[in-house]
Amino acid sequence: MNHFLTILKKELLDLLRDKKTVVMGILLPIILYPIMMIGMDKLAEKSFDVNKKNFSIVVQDDGNSQVRELLKGQKNITIKDEKDAKKALKDGDISLIVEVPKDFDESVKSQKISEVKLIYDDKSQDSAMLNSMIQSVMNEYGQKVAEQRLKDKGIDTSILTPFTTESSDISKTASGKDDAASGIVKGMMMVLPTLVVMLLLMPTIGIAVDLCAGEKERQTMEPLLSTAVNRTSIVWAKIAALAVVAIITLVCTLGAMSVSIKTIGNNAEMTFVNARFILSTGITCLFLVLAFGALQIAISIYARSIKEANSYLSGVSVLSMVLCYVPFMMDAKSIQMVFFNIPVVNTTCLLKELMAGIYRTDHLLIVLAWNVVYTVAAVLFARYMFSKEEVIFRS
């Protein structure tokens, strides 16, 4: 036990002296999450709030139609004259083309049906948003014209509304807050699970490389093995050192994420951030980080040098990133059970559920059980690799 503690102390001192470890494991989450929350909040406000954007359009009519006057009255719309309107739309100079028949006003007055065409670019978010907005404006104008026609005939305009439909958000009903309806919350629920898992796994790569391949390259592995410390104690100490840094990273990540979500984003209170969420996330992610770290140490032991270890582990990191992105577009409330049995994917899926306020004990236990299995298997694999002379002294 004394040997284990001695090696652990030595490894931790080496790691904590390394500025990269401190920056990647501790400072990065603390700095990154507030910046990310502010960025997402501002981006959502700028990108999705139609009322805070200015649009340019082209109205093709005889020059003085009611549609032109109607659109002139919209505060955030500027009507431009373009010789080649369709080219301007493709180039992004305008966001919409409104084609109004020359006899539009006469058709409306004579109670005939007329057609107004809206041409937009589906590849442009602004164009698609403006198309929906103008559709609403035109529908409202059409409703007013229909009501006026009925009034002129002495008919009650209420016949145009045979029934009404009311939508009620269950999230707002249950909590009294409109969290689920917020674009920023929806965006976070989609992006955050992937980012959290990725930011937990990535910092341990450099640590694992330094703990084993780095020792080989610095030629300090042989002196360490020649001491009275047995190899089991050495490998356990290295895994424990990585685990300590991983736990610090996990605590900093969850802490920074919780504080950022609670305090940033128009002061909206994110109801999914609570003690239950932090505890469930922390325990599940801890075993995932331990498993990933032990696997990295096993690979790093096999490598001859830091360069070779980085080459091997870059493949592992790419695979883990791909797995993190698998649940990216999934609906948190309809994730199939099979995804809770795939490494890395299962943890990301679980976080997605937790952020949606879904606490399913069976899913939590399945993911936790698998992560424990991965941890045990990775630790045993690392221990096996460390016991092989031909692995440690590869040349």
Image (cartoon, grey):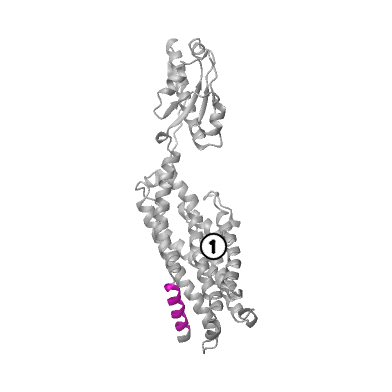
Q: Is residue 359 left or right of residue 309?
A: left
* Of residues 64 and 250, the one drawn nearer to the viewer in this rendering: 64
Q: Is residue 6 above or below residue 106?
A: below
Q: Residues within 10 Å of mark 1 (few under 14, many from 20)?
A: many
Quarter of the figure that contains the C terminus: bottom right
> In the picture shown, does residue 82 fall above or below 3?
above
Quarter where residue 248 is shown: bottom left
Front residue of 220 and 277 = 220
Q: Nearer the viewer, residue 362 or 90?
A: 90
Comparing 25 with 132, the one in front is 25
Q: Is residue 187 visible?
A: yes
On the image, which quarter does residue 297 sit in?
bottom right
Q: Amino acid at mark 1?
A: Val
Q: Residue at x 53, y 70 (%)?
A: 293
Q: Does residue 2 appear to the left or right of 323 in the view shown?
A: left
For label 1, the residue is: 367
Q: Which residues are magenta?
A: 4-17
